[in-house]
Amino acid sequence: MKKKKKLIDQIKKEEKILKEKEKSLVSQKNILQEDEYLKLVENLKIEINEFNISNQNKSKKINVENDQVTKSFLNEINKILKQFAETNNIDIILSSNQMLIGKSKLDVTQELMKMVNEKINKFEIKK
């Protein structure tokens, strides 16, 4: 999330610079010769296009990294759930939103949360 926020801040700064360039160019329209103005407009369009492509690539990279972190985290949780189920002779573990009604003594959420907190202090992203 820190990377995403940093990217958003960077994009905003670059957008502001591009908008200022555009404003400056528009204000010079009557001063510059037409061919020179058109050349500058074309250069600005190219710069904006490169900016958009670069930001799309950076955003995709961050999304892939986030997906990898999530997948790795879920793999670690699944290992813990499997171990818990085997240790406690449990055939099935349901999330609370999948269960309509049940005995409260069957709710092992707190035990599982404790195990997850103890076992997952830091995990490596498996690519």
Image (tube, rainbow, N blue to C red):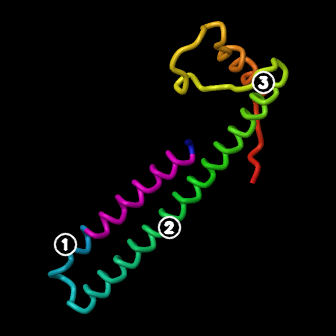
Q: Residue furthest left?
A: 30
The percent coordinates of residue 112 (x first, y second) are 71, 20
Vertical position of residue 17 compared to residue 36: above or below: above
Residue type pointed to by label 2: Ser
Q: Which residue is mark 2?
A: 54
Q: Residues within 10 Å of mark 2 (few under 14, many from 20)?
A: few
Between 108 and 120, the one nearer to me in the picture: 108
Residue at the spot x=75%, y=36% of the render?
76
Q: Which mark is residue 27?
A: 1
Between 90 and 9, the one nearer to me in the picture: 90
Q: CA distance from mark 1 to mark 3?
A: 70 Å
Residue type pointed to by label 1: Ser
Residue at the spot x=74%, y=46% of the render?
125
Residue type pointed to by label 3: Ala
- The magenta-colored residue range is 3-22
Q: Residues within 10 Å of mark 1 (few under 14, many from 20)?
A: few
